[in-house]
Amino acid sequence: MKAGIVGLPNVGKSTLFNCLSNAKAQSANFPFCTIEPNIGVVNVPDPRINKLEELVKPERVQMATVDIVDIAGLVKGASKGEGLGNQFLGNIRECNAIIHVLRCFDNDNIVHVDGNVNPIRDKETIDIELQLKDLETVEKRLEKVNRAAKTGNKEAQTEKALLDRIREALLQAKSARTIVPQGNDEEVLMESFQLITAKPVLYVCNVDENSAVNGNKYVDQVRELVKDEDAEVIILSVGAEADITELESYEERQVFLEDMGLTEPGASVLIRAAYKLLKQQTYFTAGVKEVRAWTINIGSTAPQAAGVIHTDFEKGFIRAEVISYEDYVQYGSEAKAKEAGKFKVEGKEYIVKDGDVMHFRFNV
């Protein structure tokens, strides 16, 4: 599962990517400095794993990760191939969620591709290009489906009805994610269309250092604009985050954050938000060899969770042994949680909860 960072050129995408991944995507003051998408595998900050490490004292610790993709800046006309349009659209289509970076700071030394700072216009520029590309996809699909629907084919009629609703939304400059699928058939169809504007989105307002805590007039404009979108808005001073990553020690970074009025780096908040946006959650395995956070889709069953460790665990699944994170921490160890009756044995139907500490029994 991947989240792609998108935005106009020079809004801070590559600098943000570098902060998140400590990779060194080229970050320069001109458009299209990121031509190939850069992929960073980023640890998901989770204080729970630190607590488990403290209790278990394992030989090693492995955190959950999320893939972040830095994608070339988009410009007007991208849907028709302008700039790096086709490449941009292909790269974003391969992502599961969108992190949309909006420039919300004034700085005469950093060129804006449209001449002045206006996050509302910038958002609309990208939205329109993505909607135009989806409209092209929908209309091509409708050409094929219309013929089958006229013959009375029920599946084709279901698909046509959904495509017509999506097309109408796109023509009104609304994204495909505003269309709620009716029933399982439409959900499956919606997934199969692979529409760019159907992907969940998170807005990142890139502000100056002084606005990192409370935002500014630009952030207020963005919040007002997206209030009906069911999308989260995060404030981040990407320049300050870049400075923080340059500091050598944890203590120095904490002092810097305190001076800004923050309790943790904004990058940590963003990574957790991206993880949530991708509908991911975490379960843990905890032993003296290793304490590890495993990533699963929300709603996964115990066998599916076991399969993340090894496919044999899922194939030969017998049962899962589960202690909730809260109980594990309250009693201080697996043995004491068992003594207190907090150890559960679950079967194939069990839906894993975020934070479960688990062992699997299997036989292949």
Image (tube, rainbow, N blue to C red):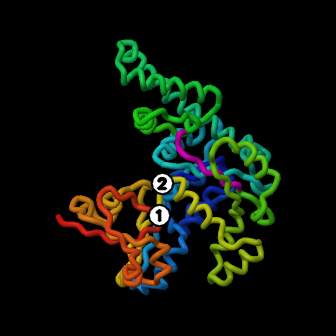
Q: Is residue 113 left or right of residue 194?
A: right
Quarter of the figure with residue 215: bottom right
Label 1, on which residue?
354
Prevailing secondary structure of the magenta residues: strand
Does residue 20 sit above or below 123 in this rendering?
Answer: below
| Quarter occupied by the C terminus | bottom left
List x then y, in percent, for residue 343: 37, 74
Residue at screen point 43% across, 78% down: 61
List x then y, in percent, for residue 311: 26, 61
Between tags 1 and 2, which lies in front?
Answer: 1
Label 2, on which residue?
2
Q: Is residue 68 left or right of residue 145?
A: right
C-alpha separation, residue under disc 1 versus residue under disc 2: 20 Å
Does residue 335 sit above or below 30 in this rendering?
Answer: below
| Residue sitting farthest toward the front | 341
* Frontmost residue, 18 versus 157: 157
| Residue sitting farthest toward the left | 364
Q: Is 199 part of what is drawn in magenta?
A: yes
Range of the magenta residues? 198-205
In the rendered structure, which amino acid carries the disc numbered 2? Lys
Sort mark 2 into few (<14), some (14-19) or many (20+) by Cα contacts within 10 Å: many
Q: Please, what secondary structure does the residue beneath circle 2 have?
A: strand
